[in-house]
Amino acid sequence: METVPRPGKGVPLKKDKLQAKRKKPRRYWEEETAPTAAGASPGPPRKKKKNLELRRQKLKNAHNSKKSWSSKKSQVTKKSREQRRPREQKNLREQKKPGSQQSLSGAQDPFPGPAPVPVQKARKFCRIDKSKKLPHSLPKTQSKLEVAEALEEEISIKAARSELLLAEEPGFLEGDDGEDTAKIRQADIVEAVDIASAAKHFDLNLRQFGPYRLDYSRTGRHMTFAGRRGHVAALDWVTKKLMCEINVMEAVRDIRFLHSEALLAVAQNRWLHIYDNQGIELHCVRRCDRVTRLEFLPFHFLLTTASETGFLTYLDVSVGKIVAALNARAGRLNVMAQNPYNAVIHLGHSNGTVSLWSPSVQEPLAKILCHRGGVQAVAVDSTGTYMATSGLDHQLKVFDLRGTYQPLSARTLPLGAGHLAFSQRGLLAAGMGDVVNIWTGQGKATLPALERPYLTHRLAGPVHGLQFCPFEDVLGVGHSGGITSMLVPGAAEPNFDGLESNPYRSRKQRQEWEVKALLEKVPAELICLNPRALAEVDVISLEQRKKERMERLGYDPEAKAPFQPKPKRKGRSSTGSMVKRKKKVLEQEHRDKVRQSLEEQQKQQKQQKAKPTGVQPSALDRFVR
Amino acid sequence: MKVKMLSRNPDNYVRETKLDLQRVPRNYDPTLHPFEVPREYIRALNATKLERVFAKPFLASLDGHRDGVNCLAKHPKSLATVLSGACDGEVKIWNLTNRKCIRTIQAHEGFVRGICTRFCGTSFFTVGDDKTVKQWKMDGPSYGEVEEPLHTILGKTVYTGIDHHWKDPAFATCGQQVDIWDEQRTNPICSMTWGFDSINSVKFNPIETFILGSCASDRNIVLYDMRQATPLKKVILDMRTNTICWNPMEAFIFTAANEDYNLYTFDMRALDTPVKVHMDHVSAVLDVDYCPTGKEFVSASFDKSIRIFPVNKSRSREVYHTKRMQHVICVRWTADSKYIMCGSDEMNIRLWKANASEKLGVLASRERAAQDYNQKLKEKFQHHPQIKRIARHRHLPKSIYSQIQEQRIMREARRRKELNRRKHSKPGSVPVVEERKKHVVAVVK
């Protein structure tokens, strides 16, 4: 498909365009030959003809460049393994009839066809990994897989196109030339923004009941907080309407909303208690005792508790059963975070490791040595790509969670961060003493650059809880002096999905959502490192089954039948020649097999040679068996 | 300093009045929709369970016959009309909408062996044990008129089956031989035989309308061309074929219902191996009929059940049975591909849904969308063991269930024996024979 004019022709085209601009525009009632006949530029007729030709080409080019999206899309398709035939045919058809875009009045649609989709955007929605090869399969299955892949790609393009319809833009904070955004105080921001946003910054002075932990509901509309000395409250923080305020008369270690704002779990000194939004105690879960940290996995309806006794317990709140109680064997657990991408629980330990847990496995899925001292805080970003940890060695590190578990960036903080939190758009907040620092990266869900903070803020007391509010540019900080709601422009995802978590949902909508969410509760057994594993082909068990079938049948049902030469026309194929042909094919196959195995052997040998021999060979090696 | 905070106007997100629909903004960003695959899997699991919950295929039983129902015929023009012939010579015409018999004719003495409608839907033909072929008007006699056939042809031998040409005024009967008749004449245009045996059924090809197939009790299926005087070719199987049915979408494909509990789908052009062997019944298959889409067919069996097979699968996707249904003799798929009728020994015609869990009636657009979505999900996750197990589970009467077990043991023993024989003989001397090739004895041209 020709789309872009070649650079060699670009210059004369431009010249020609200028000439055309000077000319009087042709009206649709005028004949096409008229302007060339009355052309201002005198010259030999041959040249004129060429000029006309160029003009035509230019028109064609213009037409093509207007449809540059289609060319871009064709680039996309070129990358895919299988070319989508129908679309190509459509493009061809469009090329054949360039006049079809023109309306009766002669006016052209300035934006013909569907809106262009940048490849980068489409990639965000792409579910298939192009780099992976399709598993070897029968031709029928292969074609089915290819069709499914093509469909997936089309869907991703459609989804990317629908991004145009999103109503809200994310917030931002930019300093003037040379101005450091970290120097901007909250008061400045409050002054600069509109009243509705300014109202989101507030301080609750609650000095009496000690350092506070806090949590936002999934819609970002409600907030709950609990002081160490037993003060528990829940409120609609946007309207500042208090839902309940109680004192549980016991030390409170942590607090969490369950799936909706109607239920909250409170880790008290002895046991885990569940209250409703009126402050009425609904349950006292005695199986979870001395809980230090709480996490709630909203799609699995699992309340995860880490306890002083070193147990990690998964409580299914929809049926009230304990799904799993895992002994981490690492002493007191007081650092916990969930990975929102795959619902794996990250525990930080005092020996500097972070272990990854799933309820279906008794052992940790992975253990990462992160710090020299104990781990103080862990946070995982919403795409499940980065994990930020801070330790007693005053280091703040960001790890890659995509298989390598290597630190991507690290920096030393003067005090070390006691609390960490990631926002929806990938901002990293750290609470160090009574200071909160926030770092940002380039764009959404990118690695935060730890060199310079994006914002800093000093609080009335040491930080005890940090949480970004979903769908609002707000960071909630619990400290010994109460609660502070900070403004952090650009922290939250601006466009929510009404069917997932809608901050403006009515009671009826919430009830309906609750039923739907319960119906599609994901069982705890499905928690694993790769949440898409369920959609992939289980090659291992497939091969195992094939092997078993072969054993049962006594032969390979899918094996290629041995070559049987077809008899040629009358009298042309003697038995001898048939045998010869058969032998030839057999030998060829044999040779191929031998060659392949030789190549494999050589490859293996090369790999072995390339392996470094680690330590120096010693004389005692000869005794090693 | 330039600053912008996220500030939403609630008016854009909340409905204005209570009469409006709620506003639901969407954002398809994958980070806002985590656990896509596990959640879809759970939805698919729920959809599969619901499908089983709503699987209530039995719609109605049409009773009124005083003897076993021997043959059924569809009306070519009216979806609601069905004709049935019984073993006592009675023919009934039914209206499926109000599930009532609208007309009863004492057509023959003895069995009604075959019944077929004319392509225009104005009349129908019956053959019976009294060696006659009768043509009847579809509409009942007017007041004062006597119920009598339009034409009656007296033959020399018993006719066992009849089928009408799909376009021309010609029909074919079978018995001792296959006769092709012109509607206007009392003698057959031509009679074709191949061997000396009684022929059970004859069927015209709906696409290549001059081709017809018959099956005889000497285990063969014979194909004829109406335009020439001799049969085309025949295939001899292990056991007798009871009836055949042509695929209404693919001209050269037909399916044969065999006494050896299997059905065989043949390609007319290559009869030496069937395209597919369909095995699931545990007794002789008595009748088969194609869905108008040509993708599936239904078979009736002596084991008191009917099964639905996809054309390209060797196992059935559905089995229907009731406590009271006895040996099913005839079965038909209605022309709108939504229902199945079967006539059985205990004098009833039963009406079933072709898709057991389908909701009848008009669907709201949201309901339809939800159904389509669920269907797609079921398709996507159909190979997962849990979903496969639920989707495949059927309750079977004990007699069928135990017979299946028994036959499985027998098949296993046979396979083991063959395996042992192959193991202990010279390599290559006991070849592996495909299941498809086991049942065809010979093809004769």
Image (cartoon, rainbow, N blue to C red):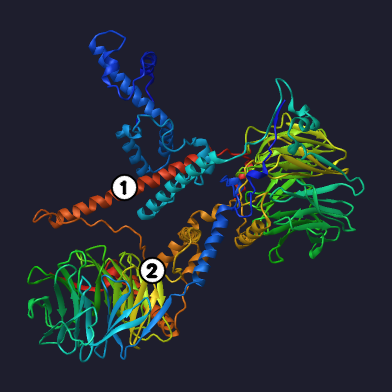
On residue A553, the disc is 2
The label nearer to you, 1 versus 2, is 2
Is the N terminus of chain A in the top left, top right, bottom left or bottom right quadrant? top left
| As drawn, A459 above or below B372 | above
In the rendered image, the residue lying farthest to the top is A42
Q: Is residue A300 visible?
A: no
Element on which disc 1 rests: helix
Residue A591 image label: 1
Q: Is disc 2 surrounded by few (<14), some (14 to 19) or many (20+) residues within 10 Å?
A: some
Tell me which residue sits at (52%, 42%) in the image: A162
- Crowd around label 1: few <14 · some 14–19 · many ≥20 (10 Å): few
Q: Position of residue A225 (x, y in %)?
A: 81, 50
Q: Position of residue A463 (x, y in %)?
A: 83, 42
Indicate the secondary structure of the residue bearing disc 2: helix
Residues flagged by tags 1 and 2 on a common chain:
yes
B134 vs B162, nearest the viewer:
B134
